[in-house]
Image (cartoon, rainbow, N blue to C red):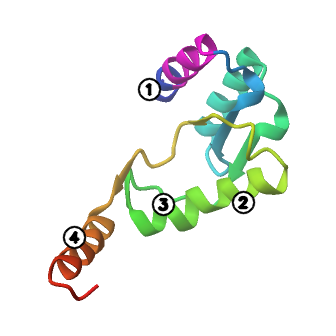
Amino acid sequence: MIAGVLFAAVVRDEARAGGGPENVAVVVNADSWASLAVANEYVALRRIPQCNVVYLSAVPSNLTVDVNQFRDLILRPVLDTLERRGLRDQIDCVAYSADLPYSVRVRADVGAVSEQQNQGARGGG
């Protein structure tokens, strides 16, 4: 239910800005009946083209994932799929269905950036 509300909020604003169904990619956890059900309804109601739907398998079941898991198991597969389908330049909004992690721990990236900044300040970068 929460995913449906988030979908509506994100895409409603996008629609007012001139975007349409062809500008939305929908990410679905292919191993989850709930994710499939929410996505199918959303895609039908918003008339999202089927080629804009990205199905992922082996998605972490945790509500929170670390940044590397997110990149490797969700972000990179979505971007690669959109690229392969020739959709990269037309997608303005990525909507996630149910049963996908909704929080990403970015501490590893923040720590790496801080360390680079410290090295630069010391003249070691």
Q: Are marks 4 and 2 in contact (CB under 8 Å)?
A: no
Secondary structure character of the magenta stretch overall:
helix
The picture places residue 69, in percent across and down from the top left corner, at 47, 66
Dot 1 surroundings within 10 Å: few (below 14), some, or many (20 or more)?
few
**Number of other residues with Cα within 10 Å of mark 3, as a class: few under 14, some 14 to 19, many 20 or more:** many
Going by the numbered disc 4, the residue's amino acid type is Ser
Residue name at image x 67 percent, y 55 percent? 79
User: Is disc 2 surrounded by few (<14), some (14 to 19) or many (20+) residues within 10 Å?
Assistant: few
Tell me where residue 32 sits by quadrant.
top right
Closer to the observer: label 3 or label 4?
4
| Magenta-highlighted residues | 7-17
**Tag 3 and tag 1, C-beta contact below 8 Å:** no
Mark positioned earlier in the residue sequence (1 or 2): 1
The residue where tag 1 is placed is: 2
Numbered disc 2: secondary structure: helix
Residue at 27 percent of width and 65 percent of height: 110
